[in-house]
Amino acid sequence: MAVDGTTIRKVVLEVCRDYSARGPGYFQSGPVLKQAAQRLSLRTENEEQALLTVWYDLFRMGVLAWGFNLANSDPPFIHMTDVGRHSLENLSRDPYNPDGYMAAVRPHIAPGSVAESYLQEAVGTFAGGFLKSTAVMVGAAAESLVLDLRDALVKRLGTLGHSVPKKLNDWRVKAVRDALGDYFAQNKNQLGQKLGERFYAFWTPMTDQVRLARNDAGHPASIAPVTHETVHAALLLFPELASLTKDLQAWVDNDLK
């Protein structure tokens, strides 16, 4: 098994899931780390240190906490937090597994793009518990996808000699998002059934959720303008938004007549 951050984090969480159900006699730092090292077949000191780095990252991120119950409240006993239990539901691509999450997103976004840069920072700030920063970063990443799709459509329309809807060149991203929505809605029959249904079901709801979370963080009316659940949802929606945007752009580039 290749020893990298993604693999180590996945294996550690799997061991935690297995051992948490076995009681305090097993769910301790020593047994969990030993079992993870065995599953990973660690052989060198550097590999062991990589495991320890991931291990303490999980505490810093709030996935794990010390103590199993009041009778075993101190190290080496541990427990999965609510955040940790939720992360296990989507182990391979949850934002609490940053490497796995980015690996799931990258097939849908251009390497080295603005969207990738902002999303990478969003995942980092989320891991650090900086929710307002995360909301702004993932919102910026989503806006970049919208603008890239707009640019592709404007270019294609120009190549075909078609008129460009005025609002596609608006400086406001929401106006551009709405103009794109109007254009694709008017051409739904050309999109094909599957892409057309995905567009109608997800374009506005997904972009609105991410946009509103970003606006709440950027124009706050309270000390805590965004919740953990809202920001987590925005990150979970982003891969689907990226996939939809990529497929719409492919249609623009290849099938728009």
Image (cartoon, rainbow, N blue to C red):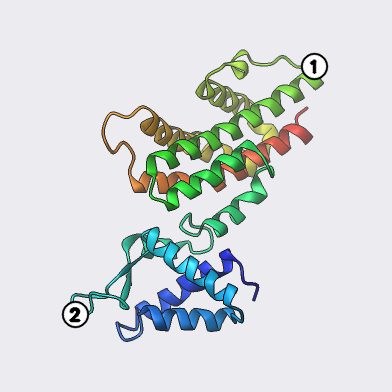
Q: Position of residue 53 (x, y in %)?
A: 49, 66
Residue occupying the far left of the picture: 70
Identify the disc placed on residue 151: none
Q: Callout 2 environment at 10 Å: few (<14), some (14 to 19), or many (20+)?
A: few
Give left or right: position of 76 versus 31.
left
| Residue in front for this viewpoint, 107 or 53 | 53
Quarter that holds the C terminus: top right
If you read the primary sequence from the N terminus, does the residue marked by circle 1 or circle 2 appear first? Answer: 2
Secondary structure under tag 2 reads loop
Residue at point 62%, 24% (across, down): 183
Q: What amino acid is labelled 1 in the image? A: Gly
Which residue is nearer to you in this view: 213 or 136? 136
Q: Nearer the viewer, mark 1 or mark 2?
A: 2
**Which residue is drawn at the image coordinates 35% and 48% (left, top)?**
228
Looking at the image, can residue 168 be seen? yes
Q: Marks 1 and 2, how far apart in space? A: 75 Å
Dot 1: within a 10 Å radius of its alpha carbon, few (fewer than 14), some, or many (20 or more) residues?
Answer: few
Q: Which mark is residue 161?
A: 1
* Residue at the farthest front position: 45
- Mark 2, residue position: 71
Query: Where's the N terminus, which quadrant?
Result: bottom right
Residue 235 position, x and y percent, is: 48, 47
